Image (cartoon, rainbow, N blue to C red):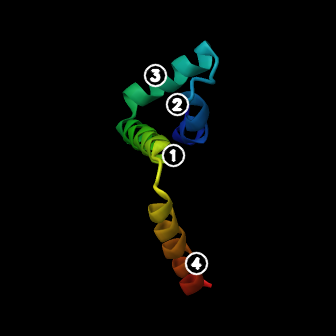
């Protein structure tokens, strides 16, 4: 399996959606390729952070502040 193949299916791999034979090939590649292993670890960490962020419940005041900040940032880039 090539690096491009592995990085292209990390979402499926991380989510457990790969069939066992293919998952095994990915794991074998990750054991042999430090670059892809580091990429996969970073990918998993980012996915975990996103899930944590989505689980946070904001107060109405904090949500209003966040909405205002996002609108301001969008206007600056437009």
What is the secondary structure assignment of the residue under circle 2? helix
**Marks 1 and 3, how far apart at CA:** 32 Å
Q: Quadrant of the C terminus?
A: bottom right
Return the x and y of residue 68 as percentages of the image width and height. 52, 75
Looking at marks 2 and 1 on the same chain, the residue that comes earlier in the sequence is marked by 2
Q: Is residue 51 above or below residue 78?
A: above
Q: Nearer the viewer, residue 25 or 20?
A: 20
> Along the polypeptide, which appears first: circle 3 or circle 2?
2
Tag 1 residue = 54
Name the front one of labels 1 and 3. Answer: 1
Q: Secondary structure at mark 1?
A: helix
Label 2 CA crowd tier, 10 Å (few <14, some 14–19, many 20+): some
Q: Please state, as top left, top right, bottom left or bottom right, where the N terminus lies in the image.
A: top right
Q: Position of residue 45 (x, y in %)?
A: 40, 41
Q: Nearer the viewer, mark 2 or mark 4?
A: 4
Residue position for label 4: 74
From the image, tell me which residue sits under label 3. Answer: 28
User: Where residue 26 sits in the image (x, y, percent)?
Assistant: 52, 26
Inter-mark Cα distance, 3 to 2? 15 Å
């Amino acid at each position: 399996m090539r690096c491009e193949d592995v990085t292209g299916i990390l979402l499926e791999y991380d989510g457990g959606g790969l069939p066992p034979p293919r998952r095994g090939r990915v794991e074998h590649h990750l054991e042999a390729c430090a670059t892809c292993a580091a990429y996969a670890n970073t990918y998993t960490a980012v996915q975990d952070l996103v899930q944590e962020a989505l689980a946070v419940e904001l107060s109405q005041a904090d949500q209003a502040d966040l909405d205002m900040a996002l609108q301001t940032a969008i206007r600056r880039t437009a």
